[in-house]
Each structure stands twice: as structure tokens, then as C-alpha cells.
Image (cartoon, grey):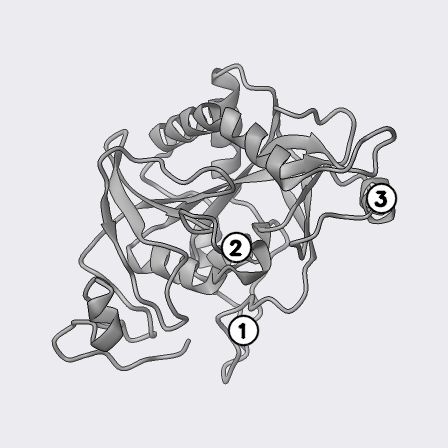
Amino acid sequence: MRRRAVNTHGRPTGARRRAGISPRASYLSDGMETTKERAEIGVYGGSGFYSLIENPREVWIETPYGMPSDKIALGEIAGKKVAFLPRHGKDHRYPPQSINYRANAWAMKALGVTRIIGPTACGSLQPEVKPGSMVVADQIVDRTSGRKDTFYDGPVTTHVSFADPYCAQLRPIAVDALRSLDIDTHDHGTIVVIQGPRFSTRAESKWFASHGWEVINMTNYPESYLARELEMCYVNISLITDYDVGLEGIEPVSHAEVMKVFASNNERVKNGIFKIIAAIPAERTCTCGSALAGARG
């Protein structure tokens, strides 16, 4: 991983100080920046989902990859320290293809986060996956292009396994938590991630659906993969806002409609996240925390 020099007093300089960016601390020997602020669970907010914690303490975390999408809100939920970051920024200033996914992931890791919950607004590719339901995905297909999707550009070649993209420990916890709230929940599904910001053509959507893939989204890659490179657990909750255009008789989706449906389901998403956080045990029994073992020759 890249290293970067730090002001000897641990303070941001110039424009960063004027912008109110919080102090940086020293880097660990492997290049990871740490901060005195701490959290154990991270949550990304998606379209229409810009707050989670009541009366949070907000901090900027500077990274070698630039600034994350916004200030990170810190607080407690169910007795656990939680960090919340709206992936698009609070004012939705970053479209999917422009999000600094590496900075967002790095900032979470620098806070000490080991588990990440990533809710997303998604379209359905299959009739049985209905709007208003939620999918706890188990697979992902990357159809993006040009996104910066690794921390390992050299000189040490690093090949991280992504055969099972989502945490095997967190997925069943998420399913049980959502179902306990009487939310129509699918316990598996494949997300196809498109580049955006445009929506799919009917031909593209039909092609995705023909493979049996259930969900379509614009942000879950490389967000989920970068968590794996930093050995953090990641679980996705896909809130289905609409049917995609490949299904017969479906009118083209609009961003305004997606935002409207997501906003109307905000409390359900938040309640689900609260339940998941409360149920996460202290001990990690998955392999996410050892993802780099054997990844280098």
C-alpha cells in the first residue's frame, strides 16, 4: 500500500485546515493511517439515506486516496461504536461512477472498523423479487468500467479471493434481523453492478435477467471488494425500489421515483440496520479478516 508523509504535529495544513478537516495521526508500518477516533461497525448510506445516528460527532478522515464522500458520523447503537458515511455525500453530490470508493473504505479501516453494512437502492430483474422487499445478496457481477478498484497497484502483486463476496457470518445475521421485522427478505441473490449514471436499456436488462441474476445496482462494486482487500467484513442489503425495464410491461425507471421509494422505506432500512448491529457478536468467525493470507507470492 502507498505511504504518505504526515505533518509532524498531526494537523492538516493549508486549505485542509481552513476546511475544518480533523487531525491525522501516524501511519502503521503497512501504510495504514490511524486516528484517535474509533468505531467497530461501519454503515454506508445510499440514495436518500443520509443519516443514521442521533446527535453524532462528525469528523473528516483524510486518506492517501483523497477525502471520503463526506464527514463520518460517529456514535453508538446497541452499545457498539458505529461510523456512518453517506456514500454519495449528504447532498448527493457524487454520482456512482465518481464516488471515491477507496477513500471511503480506507477511512473506515482507519477508524478501526471490522464490519461494514452496505444498504443499497436496487432494481429487480425477476418478477418474484418485488419492490419493497429486501435481498441479502450472496454474489455479484461487475459490469462497471474504469473505476479505481484496488489498493494494490504494485510493486507487490496481490491477488485477493472474491469467490464469496459477502461475509458468511454477517449474511445470516442480516436475514434473521430483517425477517424479525416482518420484512419480505430474500436470503440470497446476485447483484449486477452497472457503471451508471444511466439506467439500463431494455436489451441489457433482459440479458442480465436471462442469467438468473436478481438485482441491479450502480455502487456495490468496488465498494464490497475494497472492504475485502482491507480485510473488513461486508454485508449488502438491497432495498428493491422498482422493477427494471427488461421485464414485460414495465415503464422506464426514473431517479426521482427511486428516491421517492427509498425515502418512504428509510425507517424500515434503519430499523433493520439497528437490529443487525445489535445481533453482531464480538468474535469474527468468518475468513474476511485473513483475506490477504496467501494473496501474495
Q: Nearer the viewer, residue 1 or 17?
A: 17
Question: Neighbour class for label 2 at 10 Å: few (<14), some, many (≥20)?
Answer: many
The reply, left or right, for residue 206 in relation to residue 59 is: right
Disc 2 is placed on an element classified as helix
**Which numbered mark, 3 or 2, is in the foreground of this view?**
3
The Cα–Cα distance between marks 2 and 1, rounded to whole angstroms, is: 18 Å
Structural distance between the alpha carbons of marks 1 and 3: 38 Å
Three-letter code for the amino acid on which mark 1 is drawn = Thr
Quick one: label 2 or label 1, which is nearer the N terminus? 1
User: Mark 2 or mark 1: which is in front?
Assistant: 2
Q: Earlier in the sequence, mark 1 or mark 3?
A: 1
Q: Residue at x 50, y 85 (%)?
A: 155
Q: First in sequence: mark 3 or mark 2?
A: 3
* Vertical relation: 102 (above or below) 256: below
Q: Is residue 106 left or right of residue 260?
A: left
Say which of marks 1 and 3 sits in front: 3
Residue 158 - label: 1
Taking the view exactly as shown, the residue that stands out farthest to the left is: 9
The answer to whether residue 204 of the structure is visible from this angle is: yes
Q: Give the residue at mark 3.
A: 202
Label 3 to label 2: alpha-carbon separation: 26 Å
Q: Quadrant of the N terminus?
A: bottom left
Image quadrant holding the C terminus, namely bottom right
- Identify which residue is drawn at 51% across, 25% down: 264
Give x and y (percent) for residue 48.
49, 38
| Other-residue count near label 1 (Cα within 10 Å), few / some / many at <14 / 14–19 / ≥20 | some
Tell me the tag on residue 223: 2
The percent position of residue 218, horizontal first and vertical second, equals 63, 50
Pick the residue in front: 289 or 142: 142
Packing grade of label 3 (10 A; few <14, some 14-19, many >=20) is some
